Image (cartoon, grey):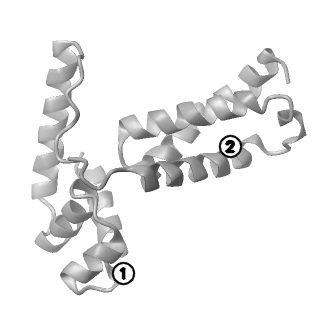
Amino acid sequence: MTEHQFHTVWLPLQDRFWRIAFYIMEDEADAKDAVQDLYLKLWKLRDNLDLIQNPSAYGSLMLRNLCIDRIRRRKPSEDLSEPMALSEPPDKALERREDLQSVRAAIDKLPPAQRKLLTLRVLQGLSYEEIEKETGLSGLNIRVQVSLARKKLKHLL
């Protein structure tokens, strides 16, 4: 596969891949890193990509596996409550803080049970099994409540 073919076939899928990675990773920076890793891996495999009949499905599956690998390698002690302090322009830092404040305000508007489960899952980074042990709720109920909380947040934001 030539560079031009790679650009015309694979690069238009970038937004789709990012959305998939963000859904899995639940973090914008991690999602961007995962998509970048995907494109590096695809570029290394470019000689065999001509055989792929459905690039979207193939890339999505590779990306899912990359995201799962990244999640497994995460350190459990990562602090997910505050965004990482990067050297970014002041206007971007202010925008990020304002976004964070609006997300926190939206989280405060959630029902208490959903707020607690979402906080345990997203901010504290607990697995569904750990949340199940801590709350005594079934795993399915926890997944449904976290999903509903995310939908409400999306609507509020």
Residue under label 1, please give it.
139
On the image, the x and y values in percent for residue 61 come to: 66, 52
Asked if residue 13 shows in the view, the reply is no
The amino acid sitting under disc 2 is Gly
Asked if residue 47 shows in the view, the reply is yes
The amino acid sitting under disc 1 is Gly
On the image, the x and y values in percent for residue 44 come to: 73, 29
**Depicted 88 relative to depicted 47: above or below:** above
Q: Secondary structure at mark 1?
A: helix
**Horizontally, is 54 left or right of 149 in the view?**
right
Q: Quadrant of residue 151?
A: bottom left
Residue at 15%, 51% (x, y): give it.
106
Disc 2/disc 1 C-alpha distance (Å): 29 Å
Tag of residue 59: 2
Residue at 18%, 15% (x, y): give it.
91
Front residue of this view, candidates 148 and 97: 97
Q: Quadrant of the N terminus?
A: top right
Residue at 60%, 46% (x, y): give it.
63
On the image, the x and y values in percent for residue 64 come to: 58, 52
Q: Earlier in the sequence, mark 2 or mark 1?
A: 2
Tag of residue 48: none
Residue at 34%, 76% (x, y): give it.
129
Q: Quadrant of the C terminus?
A: top left
